[in-house]
Image: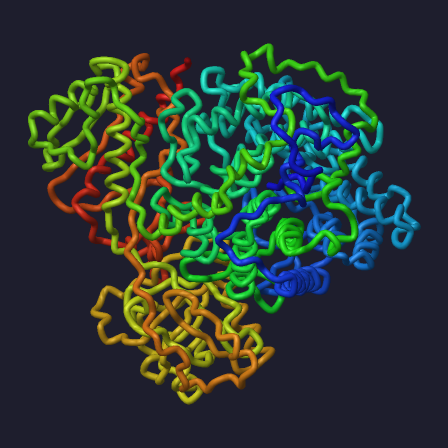
Amino acid sequence: MSEPGGGRGFGSSVPQRAPWSLVAATAALCLVSATSVWTAGASPMSREEKQKLGNQVLEMFDHAYGNYMEHAYPADELMPLTCRGRVRGQEPSRGDVDDALGKFSLTLIDSLDTLVVLNKTKEFEDAVRKVLRDVNLDNDVVVSVFETNIRVLGGLLGGHSLAIMLKEKGEYMQWYNDELLQMAKQLGYKLLPAFNTTSGLPYPRINLKFGIRKPEARTGTETDTCTACAGTLILEFAALSRFTGATIFEEYARKALDFLWEKRQRSSNLVGVTINIHTGDWVRKDSGVGAGIDSYYEYLLKAYVLLGDDSFLERFNTHYDAIMRYISQPPLLLDVHIHKPMLNARTWMDALLAFFPGLQVLKGDIRPAIETHEMLYQVIKKHNFLPEAFTTDFRVHWAQHPLRPEFAESTYFLYKATGDPYYLEVGKTLIENLNKYARVPCGFAAMKDVRTGSHEDRMDSFFLAEMFKYLYLLFADKEDVIFDIEDYIFTTEAHLLPLWLSTTNQRISKKNTTSEYTELDDSNFDWTCPNTQILFPNDPLYAQSIREPLKNVVDKSCPRGIIRVEESFRSGAKPPLRARDFMATNPEHLEILKKMGVSLIHLKDGRVQLVQHAIQAASSIDAEDGLRFMQEMIELSSQQQKEQQLPPRAVQIVSHPFFGRVVLTAGPAQFGLDLSKHKETRGFVASSKPYNGCSELTNPEAVMGKIALIQRGQCMFAEKARNIQNAGAIGGIVIDDNEGSSSDTAPLFQMAGDGKDTDDITIPMLFLFSKEGSIILDAIREYEEVEVLLSDKAKDRDPEMENEEPPSSENDSQNQSAEQIASGSQEVDLVDQESLNSHPESLSPADTDNAASISPSEQNSNPTENHETTSLDGECTDLDNQLQEQSETEEDSNPNVSWGKKVQPIDSILADWNEDIEAFEMMEKDEL
């Protein structure tokens, strides 16, 4: 996500319409201005230090871009751990993530305007020549319409915008004759068949060569798309129309936006996450500002800025009022249900919402922007990066971090608006963390797990398109950029479109349909820039005063339940019964349950089952309280359940030239040294003979005092461990024999024992999939001596280590004990439970059997794939597929051994939930 890049300075707040000027920034962009106010509290950063950090960003970009060009080009993306290009069809499928790849040198196109922003004009000219010479847009490949639009079409248009700017300056690009624009137009026409629906909403995918409906296309059967996917087209398509004079692109994008606006939920003014492209029915009715919706809101405001159409601002402000009324729970932004906006839909937030403070800056609503940004920064300081999702009590929910730039984006715009040097320090932290934890010899690697520090063989194109652009601009003075950034607007992929497009080729009729659907409150619309006195009311410590209460919000937070407690309960009535207070033996509690339509059933096995029939509640309000009670009971179980699951481990290559920069995700064992309780093991690696480790080793002198590499297969894991231990190995790494397997695409598992006493095994044992294991084997072939660290989580790299000789295998450079990782917890995710959207009073009994069970004794729950898992810090989950981890043994001797056996008694609340979860899903059939 991204925000416009500047404006004309702060104006006074005038509650009336201002005439649209040649520069389409009168109403909004002036907030993000070089004329900024900074708050005291943080010491100003010297120009020398800012230049030093800016130069550091340039070096980091060169490291990422140079390795892409050397090892990956013309492939779409770089795989930084294996130092090769990611070519679609040649690597294991990653599902929807691969829909961004179209065999069109994605990273190069996405990086074009970044080169100019970073003053690399010669490299830009060379890159444009390569694009024109090498890139083919007519490939037989199915791609995401959304990703292709924002990354490729946006990249070509951004490159064209800066190419003509450079040509006008007279030094570079004198040969350029709109070639990038012609490629953009070609791509635009290839995307148009996706809009061939009755609603005007585009199909989510299209074949670049064959379009939609042809048999060869292999697409066109989809019925659903996300709101952001359909609503994040207007900037690129309108710019293409304005540049070329072909109005069809802007017309199609406007029609899609008009349809989404018409289908919003009228009482809440919110939109859902997923919509049927043919009927316009909402498929997922939860609403937030993160994944699936985010850039829809962003493009409404920016379309007003770029195109000067008042209806876009009116729509944005209507939605924004609903967001601040229902979704915003400062400093949190929690998803709600569009029909029941006072009811939270989930207890976690995703990383994509980090763009929202920047959008609030553009809107002029600074206080909540500061609050949310500070909360996110505290999460980053705890985990080094922003996890893909985290709970309301700031535990990791999804542990990946694919080097997303949204937080850096909001940091830049908050600094532009406030001038507060605090945000320069935030940017400095981001730079340090990227270099310390994500930098690898061939680029920057995404984090597989922010808790362990393990890497994923992935460097997305948006990392070069956005991250370095925002970080460089954060530390750059105006004279450090060769053009005026304030003459451009940033797309959601941070591509630059010139503001003068607002008055070019205006052939689209701008019928204002907004007022046909809603009665607008004029007080919600400011048609000129907010006054600085409103943003910072005569207090130089204003921003600091907002941040201060949030400094310890992550460390001192208490778990929040799924229920939003309204500011006031019904007058004179007692608050509804809370799950944490419920006692099955309390008659008063049972009476309250009955009133809420919740009945208590004693099962033969001693468990107690709670079942809700909303139609049996005393009133619709009581039925709603019953739904909330059931959800809170599930959440309470999730928070208190303590399965003894072992988290993933880390194999960190610490020898030259890696120096700890490469961290591989490893599976633990049920036997041997527990790395979470003991000091990590460090040593050089050596392959065992025989390689399968299933008999006495013939090369004990080679593995003595080292970490033995053995191949999976032909015998039990425990037998392998005993054989290498008897040979004198200090640890073992089992490498999968299934060629091509990877932790990116397969769930980790725990190596189980052989059914016998394994107390005799005292060395640590870890498991690597084939792809991760190949990285170590390739390193051995190239460097002969490879030293690794086996630990529960990656250790901080010592900067001095890179200037020293590698230590011997006997020298343990790490003296501190490994941090004890907390045990995990199992949590039922309700984000897709459409029951929460419904009116309880209008449900039929068949649709309302919501059940949870309580048992007085300890027992295991068996969550199905409908359940998503979350974790405390250190818990191991399959984060890609949200599947339950399973331990395995060789030869499938026990393929379904559970990771954990002991759970807390409260876990039994979820007994029978596998059957009754369908009842929750059925409730979405209720229509309002």
Task: Using the image as rendered, state which of residue 600 and residue 899 is in the foreground.
Answer: 600
Task: Using the image as rendered, state which of residue 184 and residue 560 is in the foreground.
Answer: 560
Q: Is residue 419 toward the left or the right of residue 650 in the image?
A: right
Q: Is residue 814 toward the left or the right of residue 362 in the image?
A: left
Residue 746 x, y percent position in the rendering: 46, 53
- Measuring 41% from the left and 26% from the top, which residue is drawn there? 337
Please say if 43 is above or below 253. Answer: below
In the rendered image, the quadrant that contains the N terminus is top right
Q: Quadrant of residue 441?
A: bottom right
Please say if 466 is above or below 794. Answer: above
Please say if 10 is above or below 109. Answer: above
Q: Is residue 52 toward the left or the right of residue 546 in the image?
A: right
Task: Using the image as rendered, state which of residue 583 and residue 466 is in the foreground.
Answer: 466
Please say if 736 is above or below 830. Answer: below
Q: Is residue 797 toward the left or the right of residue 3 in the image?
A: left
- Measuring 39% from the left and 86% from the top, which residue is drawn there? 704
- Measuring 67% from the left and 36% from the top, which residue is drawn there? 30
**Outermost residue to the front:** 538
In the rendered image, the quadrant that contains the C terminus is top left
Say whether residue 25 is visible: yes
Say whether residue 880 is visible: no
Q: Quadrant of residue 698?
A: bottom left
Residue 384 x, y percent position in the rendering: 46, 58
Residue 296 x, y percent position in the rendering: 58, 31
Residue 466 x, y percent position in the rendering: 64, 49
Scheme by which the image is coloured: rainbow
**Total marks in image:** 0
Task: Using the image as rendered, state which of residue 3 and residue 69 is in the foreground.
Answer: 3
**Outermost residue to the top:** 516
